[in-house]
Image (tube, rainbow, N blue to C red):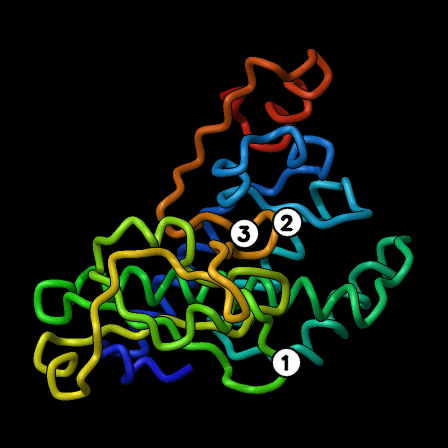
Amino acid sequence: MDAAVYGLTSDFVFRAAAEFLSSKEAVPMEVYEQLQKRARDRAFSVSRYTSAEVLNQFLRELVDAIEDGTTGTEFRKRMNDFLERNGYTAASPWHLDVIFRTNLQTAYNAGYYESMQAAKKFRPYWQYKTAGDRHVRESHAAMQDRVYAADDPIWDVWYPPNGFRCRCTVVSLSKRQVEEKGLTVSDRPPTSLVGNEPVFPDKGFSNNPATTPWKPDTSNFDTTLKSVLREKTGSDG
């Protein structure tokens, strides 16, 4: 992704992306699955692993990937070296690739969100962009090139990533750019390309993680889960 497209420096975006990931709380999957949907956006978990040591290592490696430019191949090697060195079974390349791509895409988009918020006065419109190839999901394709005001509530639902391995992005536009390109600013949600039914992001992705604070409601947690949450995060909600 090119931060220049967004009208802001890449340093700002990378710093915000790293801070977003660093702010996440590593919790085991049993706790993660009990959290409300919005609280999950600021939690971090990896299926098949419950150890705080392993979860925090995953987080550190992902933050390093942003700060130091670690590639997906390097990430996979470093994580499997760590797992095997500490007595765990190595993860499959597919599993590690999903973890790497999903978390970095979420972090980078959170960084872009912060940068576009900072420039909203001068670039008050946002446009949705897909990868534009045959791999784009039909629901995501329904959002291609659609323009909304930056403060339109659509971005609370449709800000990417909008699914695992989602490659969609959002670019900011000035009023002049919108006029020169002859773009229409929409105030309606997207509908299916083959009908007129409303479409939504993939299951579990219908929200904007960049706007979500870490405030898990533990009122429905059993005693064991509350204890685990306190142990892993120092918080019981």
Give the number of the disc on residue 154.
none
What amino acid is labelled 3 in the image?
A: Phe
Closer-to-camera residue (120/26):
120
Q: Position of residue 233 (x, y in %)?
A: 56, 32
Give the number of the disc on residue 56.
2
Above or below, 126 against 218 in this view is below
Disc 1 element: loop
Above or below, 217 against 49 in this view is above
Disc 3 element: loop
Question: Can residue 64 be seen in this snapshot?
Answer: no
Q: Which residue is mark 1?
A: 135
Nearer to us of marks 2 and 3 is: 3
Q: Residue at x 48, y 38 (%)?
A: 38
71 on left or right of 201: right
Nearer to us of marks 3 and 1 is: 1
Disc 2 element: helix
What amino acid is labelled 1 in the image?
A: His
Q: Are circles 3 and 1 on residues that touch, CB within 8 Å?
A: no
Q: Which residue is mark 3?
A: 205
Distance CA(mark 2)–CA(mark 3)? 23 Å
| Label 3 crowd bin: few (<14), some (14–19), many (20+), radius 10 Å | many
Q: Quadrant of residue 80?
A: bottom right
Q: Position of residue 176 (x, y in %)?
A: 8, 81
Q: Position of residue 75 (x, y in %)?
A: 68, 72
Question: Can residue 173 be seen in this snapshot?
Answer: yes
Q: Position of residue 125 (x, y in %)?
A: 20, 68
Q: Earlier in the sequence, mark 3 or mark 1?
A: 1
Q: Residue at x 78, y 62 (%)?
A: 82
Q: Residue at x 54, y 27 (%)?
A: 234
Q: Residue at x 84, y 62 (%)?
A: 91
